[in-house]
Image: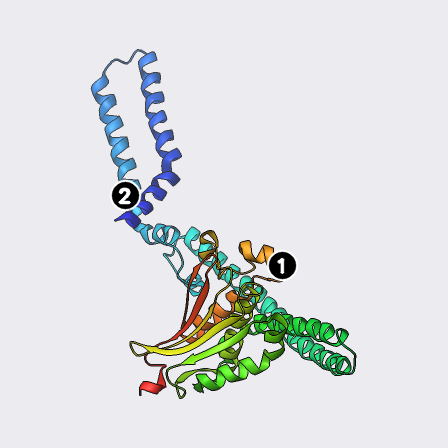
């Protein structure tokens, strides 16, 4: 009903000037006859009636014969391929069809060029990140032979650089994440052990240590191991960063709830203010805590959320200011292989 009204409104907007000219023309003719001394109004009104009748007939015919054309103009395109729709054989309709097809081809060419440039950029970023990891490893080896506290300071900075490089790498991979998946059974206990081993120096440096709690050491879920490693690392990195100086532990818990496997990272740090909660997953949003701690890029939770969504999991959180935050990676019932 609304779409039909939109078609008619567009039609009348197009013919408003024609209708106005016809009405003015009728009054001009009547005025000329009146000024010439012709006073028989009945024939004049009959002539006006016939003129309006033919005008109405023309408008009705014109609307019905070109209704498909107006419908196409008022309806939104559901896809670019809809540009190839054809209407009727009127010259203006054919001209529109030709214009849209040319525009479609033009944009397709532009899109292919941009996609090619983007792919080259992603390949460059991927290669650059891997190349940068080599000199960082060399710097770490050199730092081991230095005296303290120089050695620890250098390795702390290289760890930060590694974290930043990994963020850049996964940001680039996120755009082609569907091709980057390798879904397989993953043991959550082993995953936590691997992530904790990777972050050992990070824990020691910040004096915040993981407390692993698990109901079932053999809990297995179906996911992508590499992306889950990255997601869990991001959650742990945030938990430690916002606990430093306030608490010396974070809890990493595995449990089953109503058939769903849940991996929770809980800290007892500063917590998330209410005003920031709705935007914690927005890209580049650092919030109040990010401005205080200054090392936040605003990309960690965004990347984690995007990856979780693509994997078909859920990422939820609870937080209270001054009491800490708890982030949960929730694996659906079909992804929880322990219960199979």
Residue drawn at x 43%, y 65% as measured from the top left: 81
Give the labeled residue for mark 1.
294
> Could you say where residue 180 lies in the image, as x and y percent from the top left?
52, 80
Foreground residue among 93 and 271 = 271
Foreground residue among 310 and 234 = 234
> Could you say where residue 290 lies in the image, as x and y percent from the top left?
57, 58
Visible in this render: residue 2?
yes
The Cα atoms of the two marked residues, 2 and 1, are separated by: 68 Å
Classify 10 Å Cα crowding around label 2: few (below 14), some (14-19), many (20 and above): few
Query: What is the number of the mark on residue 60?
Result: 2
> Could you say where residue 171 lies in the image, as x and y percent from the top left?
57, 70
Residue drawn at x 32%, y 25% as measured from the top left: 26
Horizontal side, residue 34 vs residue 133: left or right? left
Figure quadrant of the C terminus: bottom left
Query: What is the number of the mark on residue 190?
Result: none
Per the image, label 2 sits on a secondary structure element best described as: helix
Earlier in the chain: of badge 2 and badge 1, it is: 2
> Could you say where residue 12 lies in the image, as x and y percent from the top left?
34, 39
Horizontal side, residue 253 vs residue 108: left or right? left
Foreground residue among 241 and 65 = 241
Foreground residue among 69 and 278 = 278
Q: Splitting the image into 4 quarters, where does residue 221 fall?
A: bottom left
Residue drawn at x 35%, y 33% as measured from the top left: 19
Visible in this render: residue 62?
no
Which residue ends up furthest to the left in the rendered image? Answer: 42
Per the image, label 1 sits on a secondary structure element best described as: loop
């Amino acid at each position: 009903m609304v779409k039909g009204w939109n078609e008619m409104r567009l039609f009348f907007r197009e013919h408003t000037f024609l209708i106005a000219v016809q009405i003015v023309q009728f009054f001009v003719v009547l005025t000329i006859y009146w000024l010439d001394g012709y006073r028989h109004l009945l024939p004049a009104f009959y002539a006006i009636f016939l003129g309006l009748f033919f005008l109405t007939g023309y408008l009705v015919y014109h609307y019905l014969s070109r209704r498909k054309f107006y419908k196409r103009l008022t309806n939104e395109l559901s896809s670019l391929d809809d540009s190839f729709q054809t209407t009727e054989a009127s010259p203006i309709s054919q001209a529109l069809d030709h214009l849209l097809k040319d525009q479609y081809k033009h944009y397709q060419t532009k899109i292919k060029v941009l996609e090619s440039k983007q792919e080259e950029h992603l390949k460059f970023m991927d290669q650059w990140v891997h190349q940068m990891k080599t000199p960082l490893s060399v710097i770490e080896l050199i730092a081991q032979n230095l005296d303290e506290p120089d050695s620890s300071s250098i390795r702390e900075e290289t760890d930060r650089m590694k974290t930043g490089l990994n963020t850049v790498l996964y940001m680039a991979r996120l755009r082609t994440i569907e091709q980057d998946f390798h879904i397989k059974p993953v043991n959550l206990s082993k995953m936590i052990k691997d992530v904790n081993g990777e972050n050992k120096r990070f824990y020691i440096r910040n004096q915040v240590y993981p407390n692993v709690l698990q109901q079932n050491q053999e809990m297995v879920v179906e996911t992508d191991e590499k992306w889950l490693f990255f997601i869990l690392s991001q959650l742990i990195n945030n938990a430690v960063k916002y606990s430093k100086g306030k608490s010396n532990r974070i809890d990493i818990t595995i449990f089953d709830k109503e058939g769903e496997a849940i991996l929770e990272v809980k800290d007892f740090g500063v917590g998330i203010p209410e005003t920031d909660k709705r935007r914690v997953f927005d890209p580049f949003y650092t919030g109040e805590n990010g401005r205080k701690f200054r090392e936040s890029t605003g990309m960690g939770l965004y990347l984690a959320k995007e990856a979780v969504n693509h994997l078909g999991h859920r990422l939820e959180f609870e937080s209270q200011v001054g009491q800490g935050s708890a982030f949960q990676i929730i694996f659906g019932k079909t992804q929880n292989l322990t219960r199979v």
